[in-house]
Structure formats: structure tokens, C-alpha cells
Image (cartoon, coloured by chain):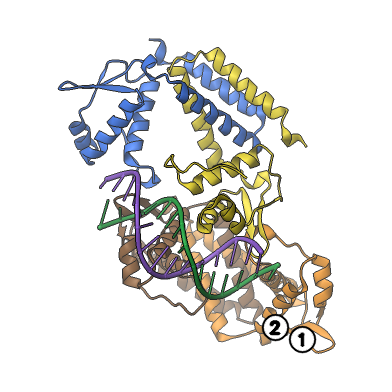
Chain colours: A brown, B orange, C blue, D yellow, E green, F purple
DNA sequence: GTGGTCTAGACCACC
DNA sequence: GTGGTCTAGACCACT
């Protein structure tokens, strides 16, 4: 399903969380779709099931998936994730990152072009199915 | 000089690094300006000097400050920080954060407005001194 | 008859138990009224009959319904449910929840108003039929 | 520090969470007070450190404590816990529990007396220090 | 078979 | 010393 990098110092469970978030946000995993069971994914990635479970639990806390005992884990609908604190946090992150790039000398025009690309990629993306 | 928040779980040394980056990027701390000695800042924040040391080492590694034996630590010039890997990393972060907000249902127009504000705030900011 | 929510993590059989308790307490289901057979309800909710069975067993154990071989399951009379341990348990729950809200900073007056509403809603409710 | 009951089927880590919440809400543990380290409490209760850590992590998620690497875990201030969803949830719980008792035949006057006691106990409690 | 809890014990990052 | 991550493997509850 995807690659792990054990050398970065980034916890494995966080890498899994981020990877799933990417797959969900990009629209590759759709709402109510089933994701691999804890044990299956553990086998596939040859890591401990507890680590997967920790990742799934974190994803559930953040609203990206929901788990049902005896059935499995599934992707949530986007409106379940929305949270005002999170929105504020993400906006601040974007602000900081843009300012950092500008300070380092990136030309504003280049930056604005890059951001336009993000928006047009989004509009043309898979989420319009 | 600034406030620490022990409650976030974020390592203290990282908070110091981020705070300095903020002050540098926003233009409050200017190139070649001297920053407090390790001991002074440790006293002022009532934390362990080792923690400050680690923060300064990290800032130096990232290119934001430089140290001169026997004189102290100073702010670097912006072009010293520039690093292609970092630029790519920051761009990817911006991409991810914007997509996450869009996925959660934020309207693209709202998002674009928010970003325009960042640029105009930058252009009107202190870095034009 | 009612909606299930698989996403809460709450076991399905418990959701069914709680839903029945709600219907009984609010007076919508009246003493000695017949409730659907295990098989019918399972079909209607498209879930496994074993799950319904477990829910009914729990409701019977708690005194809310009684079963008659060959006839079906029926709502009990309120005095059948009364149980001193349970009364103590519920009182303690109420105590804990109120204290938690007060600790979090809810004003006592607001809290008292809210509770008054519960009582007046009860007095004006369906149980006086 | 406190008693565990391994026979109830209630997860140990939840019992620890609930116990701490009680101690915090009742004012016995005060904001910024240090709580035992993961290892110490594990030794004291003769259970696995991982179980304590899970409990502490849950308490942190719910806003009751905060943890600092290398320093320990501490009680949060009450306003950190406040959360609108939680308030709504607790109010609904109180509503349900009161209605359940009334349905079972508890006299409203008795119930109202009980609740008055809660409020007066609160007003006379330790939180006014 | 699924997710959830728990143990025993190792290792790392932070202060 | 502190909290945080990870493994290996057991057992339970739910569908």
C-alpha cells in the first residue's frame, strides 16, 4: 500500500497517519470505504499490529476514520473532520510557511503562481466525482 | 523576551527556535543584530542553559544565526538561509495544508482571500525598512 | 423503527438497548405493549439477529422488557425496573456530570435553569396519559 | 493513591482516567500540581507502565492534564477542558439519567432535593480556595 | 475475523 | 529522571 521510512526519526505511526490523510484528502480513499484491518496492514508493512492500531486510533481522534468492533475501519465523511481550532491552526501554518519563503527571498510572483497551481489542481481533481 | 508554553507537549527548545524564526522573519530581529547569550536567556526564561544551547545550535544549523567565539550569536542575512530542500519542503507543506482545508469544506474563495491578505501584509511590512 | 450509527464506536447492541430505553422512558412504548420479534427487527435494521438477541437479553436483564415463550417480548411496568443499586448508580452519575460542568466553569444558575426545564418537561409529558 | 477493580470488565486505563477526573473535579488535585510519573504509578498499582501511559494520554486528549517530556505530567487549568460538544453531551446525560429515575418512580420532590444537595455541596467545597 | 486492552521489556528524546 | 515509541505475543468483546 505504501512506503515507510524508518530512518527519519519520525514515528512510524505518524507516517502512517500522514499517509492515510494524504490518500483521503487527495480523494483516492472515499468516504465509507473500508481500509485494511489492523493485522493485515501490520503483516504487509512487517511492523507490529500495536503500531498500526495506534495510527488508526489517532486517525479516529482526528475524525478521518471510524472503527467498528468486529467489522473493520472505514473512511469518514469530510464534514466529520471540520473543527474550528484545526482550521485556525492550518491557516496559521500556511501564513508562517509563506512568510518564511518570502523572507528567504522567493519572489512573491513565483509564490503566487505556485499557489494558483494548487487551486487549479484541486478544482480539476478527483473530488468532483 | 517571549513566552513559553509548557502545556503544548512541544519541546521547549523547539518553541525557542520557532519564536526566534518568527522574530527574524517578521523583521523584528535584523541581520547582524546580537541575540542574548545562552546564560542570559536561560536566566530570563528560568530554564536550563542546555535547552537554550540546543535551540541556538538548531538555529545555526538551519542558517538563521551564526556564532562567533568569544563574541556571541548574531542574526544571519536572509540569503544564508536559502536552501533548495527547504524551499521544496515548505512548498509541499503549503500544498498539503491548503488541500486539507479545501477537503474539509472551506470555500476556495475564502481561502484565496486569506492568502491575498498574507501577501499584502508582507508587502506592507517591516522588511522594507 | 430507528436509526443506528456505526461511526460512534459504541457497540450496536448497546445502541439498540439505549434506544429502547429512551422510547420506554419517554412513554412512547407503553407497559405490556409488544415489541418486534428478533428476526423482524434484524431484517428491518439489516443487521445480524444475534445482535438483536443480545440487546433484548440485556433489556430483560435490566428489567425493561419481559419475554414469553412462543408469544414474543413485551414492555415491563415501571416498578419492575426499580433497583436500589441502579438508583444509586444513576444518582452518582448525575452528581458527577453536574460537578464536571460546574468545574468547567458553567454558571450554577444556568445549570439550575437547565434542570428545572427537565422537570417541567417531564411533568407536562406523555407519562400522565 | 487509589483502588483498582479488575473484575468489573471496565478497562483499567479508564478506571484510572475516571479516578483522576474525580480528584481534579473535586479540587483535591489543583492546577499545575504534578502527578506521579508513569513508572511510579505503575509500580504503585503493580500494573504495566503502558497502561498508565494510555490513561495519561487520554487525560491529556480530554484536556485534564498536560505532559512535558523530561519533566512530568501536570494538572491543567479548568478553562482548558471546556468544549462545547462536551457540555452538550453532559447536559444530555443529565437529562437522560433524571428521566430514567423519574420513570422508575422516584418522586420528583426527592430528586429535586438530591440535586439541591449537589449544588450546595459544590458551593461549600474546596474549589473556593 | 475484527478492533480493543494489557503485559513485559527495550530504546530514544528531552530536561 | 521524565514522557514517548515500538515490539512480541496474549486475551477479550463484537459481528
Q: Is residue D45 left or right of residue C41?
A: right
Q: Position of residue A68 (x, y in %)?
A: 34, 49
The residue sitting at 52% across, 80% down in the picture is B88
Q: Residues within 10 Å of mark 1 (few under 14, many from 20)?
A: some
Residue at mark 2: B60
Q: Are marks 1 and 2 in contact (CB under 8 Å)?
A: yes
Q: Residues within 10 Å of mark 2 (few under 14, many from 20)?
A: some
Q: Is residue B99 left or right of residue D32?
A: left
Judge whether residue D6 can be spotted in this image. Answer: yes
Q: Nearer the viewer, residue B112 or A81?
A: A81
Q: Quadrant of the N terminus of chain D?
A: top right
* Image disc number at residue B67: 1
Chain-order first, disc 1 or disc 2 = 2
Q: Position of residue A99 (x, y in %)?
A: 64, 72
Q: Nearer the viewer, residue C111 or D115?
A: D115
C51 relative to B52, above or below: above
* Image disc number at residue D83: none
The residue sitting at 49% across, 32% down in the picture is D93
Q: Is residue A104 left or right of residue C123?
A: right
Amino acid at each position: 500500500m505504501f512506503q515507510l521510512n524508518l530512518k527519519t526519526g519520525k514515528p512510524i505511526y505518524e507516517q502512517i497517519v500522514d499517509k492515510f490523510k494524504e490518500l483521503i484528502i487527495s480523494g483516492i480513499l472515499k468516504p465509507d470505504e473500508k481500509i485494511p484491518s489492523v493485522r493485515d496492514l501490520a503483516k504487509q508493512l512487517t511492523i507490529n499490529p500495536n503500531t498500526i492500531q495506534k495510527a488508526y486510533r489517532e486517525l479516529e481522534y482526528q475524525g478521518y476514520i471510524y472503527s467498528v468492533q468486529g467489522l473493520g475501519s472505514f473512511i469518514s465523511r469530510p464534514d466529520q473532520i471540520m473543527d474550528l481550532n484545526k482550521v485556525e491552526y492550518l491557516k496559521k501554518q500556511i501564513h508562517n510557511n509563506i512568510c518564511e519563503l518570502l523572507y528567504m527571498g522567493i519572489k512573491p510572483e513565483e509564490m503566487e503562481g505556485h499557489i494558483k497551481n494548487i487551486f487549479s489542481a484541486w478544482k480539476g481533481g478527483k473530488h468532483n466525482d
